Each structure stands twice: as C-alpha cells, then as structure tokens.
Amino acid sequence: MPVSLEIPDEVLSALRLPPRAIDRELRKVLSAPRLEILARVPALQPKSIAALARSLKRDFKNVYADVMFLADLGLIELKAEGRRKTLIPIVRFSGIEVDLGAAA
C-alpha cells in the first residue's frame, strides 16, 4: 500500500515557488540515496542501521542521517530491540504518492 504525502495548497502558496522549484526541493527531500533506502529496506530487512549501511555500501553516518530524516517524515519506522536498543529500520508501504495540488 502506498503512503501519501499531500502538500496543502496553502503551503505551496506560502512557498511562492514555481513548479520546477518545487520539483527541485522535493528531489532534495526524496534524494536518490533516500529513495534507495526506502526501496531496499523491505527486501533486505536489516537488523540495524549499520547492517543497512553495509548492504548499501555507504558510510554509516550518512545512512544514519538519511534514516533519521525519513523517520521524522514518518516514512520509516524505527524499532528499538535488544539490550542495547538497536534501531531496526522498517518500511511498511510499497510506494509514495505526492499530491502537489494546484502546483501540478
């Protein structure tokens, strides 16, 4: 099931950005490395963010920052497990839909 990110018209109006600029900003939020994380977590089912970073062949610090950013957006769930409270990233949807309202 896809998750829907709707950007209200009043937010788009407040941004006062042309559609191309909105597209550029959206690409910063959902960058290729972040989209790769969202796409690969369900298949990899990593036991930690460190395991995810190793699987993606990316630096832990950068993967951790991307995972935390996506968790703040509600796109990744983090489950603390074990005595050390290891954070396990979980993605529970199959796609993302973005509604740009009047900007489309």
Image: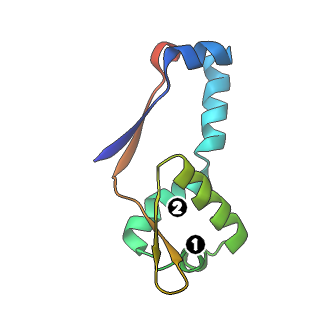
* In this view, 72 is above or below 89: above
Tell me the quarter of the picture where residue 57 sits: bottom right
Left or right placement of residue 103 versus residue 93 in this view: right
Outermost residue on the front side: it is 83
Q: Label 2 neighbourhood size at 10 Å, few (<14), some (14-19), many (20+)?
A: many
User: What kind of element bears circle 2?
Assistant: helix
Measuring 52% from the left and 61% from the top, which residue is drawn there?
37
Counting every numbered tag in the picture gives 2
Q: Label 1 neighbourhood size at 10 Å, few (<14), some (14-19), many (20+)?
A: some
Res 17 seen here: no
- In the rendered structure, the answer to whether residue 79 lies left or right of residue 15 reads left
Amino acid type at image mark 2: Ile
Q: Mark 2 points at which residue?
A: 37
Asked whether residue 91 is in view, the answer is yes
Q: Give, as a three-letter code, the residue at label 1.
A: Leu
Residue 95 coordinates in the image, percent (x, y): 37, 47
Is disc 1 placed on a helix, strand or loop? helix
Q: Where residue 44 sits: x, y (%)?
A: 42, 74
Q: How far apart are marks 1 and 2 (CA)?
A: 8 Å
Contact flag, marks 1 and 2 (Cβ < 8 Å): yes
Residue at the extreme bottom: 83
Judged from this view, the residue extending furthest toward the left is: 1
The spot of residue 100 in percent (x, y) is: 48, 23
Q: Which residue is drawn at 66% across and 72% down?
A: 58
16 over 98 or under it: above or below:
above
Out of 97 and 20, give the one closest to the viewer.
97
**To which residue does mark 1 refer?**
56
Q: Which mark is residue 69?
A: none
Residue 13: x and y in percent read 60, 12
Task: Please name the residue shown 66% across and 32% down the image.
Answer: 24
Does label 1 or label 2 sit earlier along the sequence?
2
**Which residue corresponds to the image point at 50% horizontal and 26% vertical from the top-left?**
7
